[in-house]
Image (cartoon, rainbow, N blue to C red):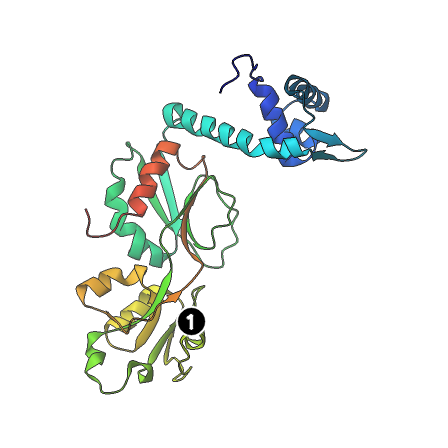
Amino acid sequence: MTDRNFKMPPLEWIRAFEATARLGSFTAAAAETGLTQSAISQRIGHLEKLLNTALFHRRSRTIELTLEGEAWLPHVRASLNSLRDSSEALFGAVRGSLTFSASQSIIDLWLQPRLHLLCDLSTASISVQTMVLGAHSAPQDDVIRIRYGSGDWPHDYKLKLFDEQIVPVASPKLLKGQDHWTQWPRIACSGPRPGWNDWASRFDTPTTPLPKWRFDTLLPALGAARVGMGVLLTSQALCKADLASGRLVQLGSDILQHHESYWLLASRDAVSRAQWEKLAAAMRHPLGDD
């Protein structure tokens, strides 16, 4: 039952508590919020007095959350995040232009087939930039990125595009041969995905024959597989169009699950909350379900 006599703490006191708990010091919280250290300390003191509970242990050189502070912190963060997200969704400025950065393979195989679904993202103009492998340029906060990994990036918005499942594929032309597919020429592709050695270890298959063809990106590797140059180990999600059209066939039912995959990443400088929600829906949209 709600206690109607409970007095809600002022928001600025709560923000001072959250910043201090997150950053681990009054000084850092003061720098982030634009206040003085004494002002942060004073607001937290008022908050503790109102709640009749100590939120921090003050040491000579450090501060630590009390058990009560640790218990309250997740609720504070969830409430502040909800308030921020709802405010941005209702009142946030819609970005006039959206810029995407991805590898050429993911642009061709995932992004471009779904770009038409972004037409209702207000009147924003859309730019697509090809990510150059090995480039060391400084990250841009106003760019929407598609990157491969486990998802541990410090972005405001993150979306896993699909679960990575690795499968062997080949042209139907090769099916006319009498040998089992593990004896056919193999195609290798550089990159972060598991390769033929990982496949051999997982399914106890020979590591030979060694790949006859090696490519540094997925697009030419898929092209080689389409014309019957060999068997390619690749992402099932990224070759769905080839599998659906019959240009490629999946060989067997074995699937190598991988913990990493492609993620859509953005900051609040790159896209508004409302735009992100539409963008996320478009990027997860199955092809053929338009």
Residue 243: x and y in percent read 23, 65
Foreground pick, 82 / 48: 48
Residue 42: x and y in percent read 70, 19
Badge 1 element: loop
Residue at (72, 21) in percent of width and height = 38
Location of residue 46 (image quadrant): top right
Residue at (25, 38) in percent of width and height = 119
Foreground pick, 53 / 31: 53
- Tag 1 residue: 195
Work out which residue is located at the far front of the displayed protein and give it.
1
Residue 187: x and y in percent read 35, 75
**Image: 106 above or below 251:** above
Residue 18: x and y in percent read 60, 30
- The total of numbered circles placed on residues is 1
The answer to whether residue 82 shows anywhere in this view is yes
Q: Is residue 240 left or right of residue 193?
A: left
